[in-house]
Image: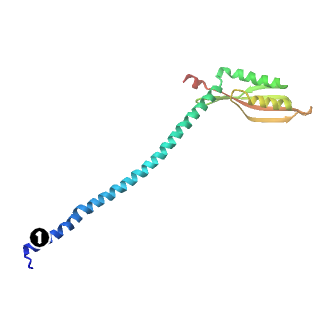
Amino acid sequence: MHFSLREAMFILLLIMLPVAAYFFVFQPRNEQIAGARAEILKKQAKLRHLEAATKDIEDLGIEIERLEETIDLFEHKLPAAREVEVVLREVWQLATKNSLQPKGVRTDKPLSTAQYAELPLRMSISGDFDGFYKFLLELEKLPRITRMPNMVLKKAPDAQGEVNADVVLSIFYESPSAISS
């Protein structure tokens, strides 16, 4: 069998056609597919990250609601500035109820923030230690927010079981700026 130049060129062209198709069609397409797969993997990882963040956001929403309820509870426990005297009277009555002699009360300068103010009260109390302990327990049960940042307790020199106490009692109340807003 004898091939002419024309037939040899045709066979060569038939062989070159799949090779050219590989380099000009299939190889670029495979690169596009590999790039698309890499992008899909990145987006899937980002989606998993967003799903985890969304789960945390739902939990944060519940936590924010719980904290808002707690803040409302504490705000209801804050007396208005005009009710501070009522709280002071309650503390004085607790002291006398527990057989203590309040010797004096002195107020310090109020410490204000945006939502509340703190009024430190310095009290000097003397009496029976058991009465003083009961006073502290009842003070803790008051419906108002109070704290005792400082207390100096000394044994009375003249009587057995008697104490002299210098107490700083902080009473929290609504700040006038919070009331106006």
Q: Residue 38: percent from the left, percent from the top? A: 37, 56
Indicate the quadrant where residue 27 lies: bottom left
Q: Is residue 8 left or right of residue 29?
A: left
Query: What residue is at 66 percent from the left and 20 percent from the top?
Result: 82
Of residues 77 and 14, the one nearer the viewer is 14
Query: Mark 1 Cα within 10 Å, few/some/many (few <14, many 20+)?
Result: few
Indicate the quadrant where residue 130 lies: top right
Figure check: 56 above or below 15: above
Check the image and name the residue furthest to the bottom: 1
Figure check: 57 above or below 84: below
Q: Residue 150: percent from the left, percent from the top? A: 75, 35
Of residues 171 and 32, the one nearer the viewer is 32
The N terminus sits in image quarter: bottom left
Q: Residue 20: percent from the left, percent from the top? A: 20, 66
The residue at which mark 1 appears reads as 10
Q: Is residue 63 left or right of residue 26?
A: right
Q: Residue 127: percent from the left, percent from the top? A: 86, 29
Indicate the quadrant where residue 91 lies: top right
Badge 1 amino acid: Phe
Query: What residue is at 43 percent from the left and 52 percent from the top?
Result: 45
Query: What residue is at 17 percent from the left and 66 percent from the top?
Result: 17
Q: Is residue 93 left or right of residue 53?
A: right
SS at mark 1 in the image: helix
